[in-house]
Amino acid sequence: MLKKRYMVSNGLAFFEELDMKKLSKKAAKGWHLKRFRFAGYELEKGDAEDVIYNIDYRTLPADEKDEYFELFAFGGWTHVCSSADMHIFKATPGTTPIYSDVESAIDKLARLAKPVNIVASIMLAISMILWIWMTVSSGTLHHIAQQGFACSLIITVPALMTSGGVYYHMWKSLRVNSKRFIKNS
């Protein structure tokens, strides 16, 4: 019988909440998140567990990690795994959400957006330079620029889509918050 399983991520920038719900459903069937894997998660077989998952994006110096995880533990959240600046936690249903207000949720998205925007900006600049080079050159230089431009689009397009997804979630959070404010006024 399999002890490990791979679950594909839907893309945290677009479907973070969906991924966390899928992980919760898998845990209810006895498949628990063990660690991040390329474009997904590694699950390990165990006892069925009723838990919710949540993710936080934060760059931490090595000496601050214990304090950071302790802060979440105080709120009822158990650290499950980390990869770079992404940290997944689990808790029992009913535990106060990690991001219970819109401002902190937007702050989380802003932390996620920073590295994505850097990559998207650099790749967009490279693509534009290669496109200009491709349009003004001829012969071998034109073909080199053409191939470079095509290759750069492989990274540029997904990076721009991811950046757009993050900003969409920020806009959506602000929109939901403004509707609540108007309703309560």
Image (tube, rainbow, N blue to C red):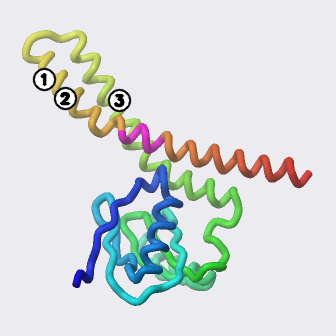
Q: In which quadrant of the rendered view does residue 133 lie?
A: top left
Q: Is residue 119 visible?
A: yes
| Mark 3 secondary-structure assignment | helix
Cα–Cα span, label 2 and label 3: 13 Å
For residue 66, side relative to residue 44 (left or right)? right
| Mark 1 secondary-structure assignment | helix
Task: Name the residue located 58 percent from the left edge and 80 percent from the top edge.
Answer: 71
Label 2: which residue?
Answer: 148
Cα–Cα span, label 1 and label 2: 6 Å
- First of labels 2, 3 by sequence position: 3
Where does the image place residue 4, in percent across and percent down from the top left? 27, 78
| Mark 2 secondary-structure assignment | helix
Residue located farthest toward the bottom when viewing the structure as drawn: 47
Q: Is residue 67 visible?
A: no
Verify CB contact (< 8 Å) between mark 1 and mark 3.
no
Amino acid type, residue under disc 3 in the picture = Ala
Amino acid type, residue under disc 1 in the picture = Ile
Give, as a single range, the part of the protein colored magenta.
Answer: 158-163
- How crowded pointer 3 is (Cα within 10 Å; few <14, some 14-19, many 20+) is rated as some
56 and 111: which one is in front?
Answer: 56
Amino acid type, residue under disc 2 in the picture = Gly
Label 1: which residue?
Answer: 144
For residue 96, side relative to residue 70 (left or right)? right
Res. 125 mark: 3
- How crowded pointer 1 is (Cα within 10 Å; few <14, some 14-19, many 20+) is rated as some
Verify CB contact (< 8 Å) between mark 1 and mark 2.
yes
